[in-house]
Amino acid sequence: MKILRLSICTALVASAVLTGCHTGGAYTPRNTQRYAVENDEPFVAMSSGVQRSVTCSGIQQRVREDGRLELVANLRNREARRIQIQVSCVFKDENGFPTGDETPWQDLILTERAQEGVKFVSMNEKARKYTVRAREAR
């Protein structure tokens, strides 16, 4: 009887040890492309309300004489009501990495079905790419 209990306990401990938990080491990242819109798109909506109400019909860019990047984003209100949003721009280098140059959020009021151009200028000459972001005004 004692031998039977001992062998059952030994079997349980052995199975726990053999099937055990992952105790260390590195893990591979999951869903790496799921929330990477800011890496690929020049304009992103930071909330569902802005995604529904605002579109960017175009972005003009040029490099100024001093080497800084200047762009104008044409934002359009798709709603038949006046809305207030905030816009910002993150400037990136030619490889898509942020240069540390990010504009502060600025308020923008769009009247019914209106289009408005918003101008951004980088602070240094490293900027070659960008992401214009829009969110609901707080």
Image: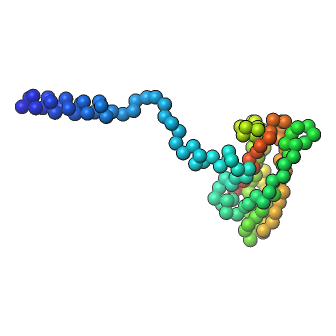
Residue 33, horizontal then vertical, whole percent: 59, 46
Residue displayed at 76% across by 45% down: 130
Quarter the C terminus occupies: bottom right
Residue displayed at 74% across by 57% down: 85
Is residue 138 in sight in this rendering? no
Up-down relation of residue 13 to residue 132 (above or below): above
Is residue 2 in sight in this rendering? yes
* Left or right for 38, reference 21: right
Residue displayed at 78% across by 50% down: 106
Going by the picture, which residue comes out furthest to the front?
A: 95
Nearest the eye: 85 or 125: 125
Residue 119, horizontal then vertical, whole percent: 84, 50
Up-down relation of residue 66 to residue 82 (above or below): above
Up-down relation of residue 44 to residue 52 (above or below): above
Residue displayed at 72% across by 68% down: 79
Residue 14, horizontal then vertical, whole percent: 24, 30
Figure quadrant of residue 53: bottom right
Up-down relation of residue 40 to residue 98 (above or below): below
Quarter the N terminus occupies: top left
Nearest the eye: 68 or 81: 68
* Left or right for 25, reference 122: left
Q: How did the renderer colour the structure? A: rainbow
* Left or right for 47, reference 2: right
* Left or right for 3, reference 38: left
Count of labels in the image: 0
Going by the picture, which residue comes out furthest to the left?
A: 1
Going by the picture, which residue comes out furthest to the bottom?
A: 80
Residue 70, horizontal then vertical, whole percent: 86, 45
Figure quadrant of residue 76: bottom right
